[in-house]
Every structure is written in C-alpha cells, then in structure tokens.
Image (tube, rainbow, N blue to C red):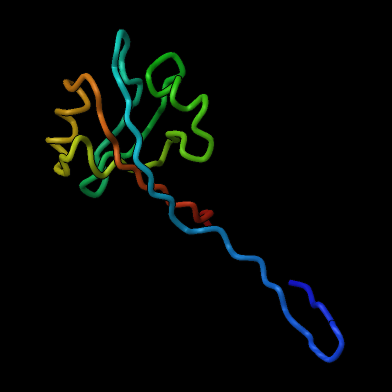
Amino acid sequence: EFLDQIGDHTSVHVAEPPAPFLDFVLSLSREKDKLGIRFRERAGMLEIVEALENSAVGRYNATAGEHSIQPGDLIHEVNSQTSVEGMVHELLSAPTVELRVHRDCRKPS
C-alpha cells in the first residue's frame, strides 16, 4: 500500500490480491504415448498426484505456464463426464481428452 499526494488529493493504491482459485480447460492427445498423470479420487473429483515429464502432460506442461498440470490440481470434468467413474473411463480409453481443472491458489496457513 502506498499513498500518492497530488495537490489537495490523496489516493490510496492497494495491490490486488491474487485470485484464490484458477480454473482452466485443456485438451490432450494420447498419440503414441500415455497421458502421464497419476490421480486419486477426492471429493467427487480426481486429484492430480503426479504429472509425468515424458508424456502428453509433460509436453503440455513445457509451454503451459500457470496453466500447467500440478500435483493438487482437481479435475472436475473429462470429455463432458463429471462422475468419477465417467472421468476415469475417459482418461483410460479416449484418444483425446478435454480436462476442466480447478486449482486452489491460496497458500496453506
């Protein structure tokens, strides 16, 4: 926080806090190798446990910046499937997957 004094006016500038959540969509093609994510069920979603480097996810992550797949991210939809069973089926069998991902950006206290 800092103050600007211009003539008779004083204004306060407060930096915007980072957004507490990040939601994004990505599409991955299995092609010749595996998708490269390890996950577990969590609260009706799939939590990313590991994103493997030599895989479709690894290639995506190399250029995705803040939208890279990270441990702790939650997948809440895969190819329009929202049940855990439907999402797992798509991840294991579909040649291309569209993932809707949710990330909690708040730092643990």
- Give the residue at the far top of this rendering: 32
Q: Is residue 17 left or right of residue 99?
A: right
- Looking at the image, the residue that sits furthest to the bottom is 8
Q: For the image shown, how many numbered marks are present on the structure?
A: 0
Quarter of the image for residue 99 reads top left
- Give the residue at x 46% y 39%: 67
Residue 27 pos. (x, y %):
32, 30
Residue 61 position (above or below residue 102):
above
Side of 108 where 1 appears, left or right = right
Residue 56 percent location from the top left of the image: 37, 19
Instruction: Choose top left, top right, bottom left or bottom right for residue 55.
Output: top left
- Decide: is 109 above or below 53: below
**In the rendered image, the vertical position of residue 29 relative to residue 16, given as above or below:** above
Which image quarter is the N terminus in? bottom right
When the figure is inspected, residue 107 is found, relative to residue 40, above or below; the finding is below
x and y, in percent, of residue 106 in the image: 50, 56
Residue 49: horizontal and vertical position, in percent? Answer: 37, 32
Residue at 78% x, 73% y is: 2
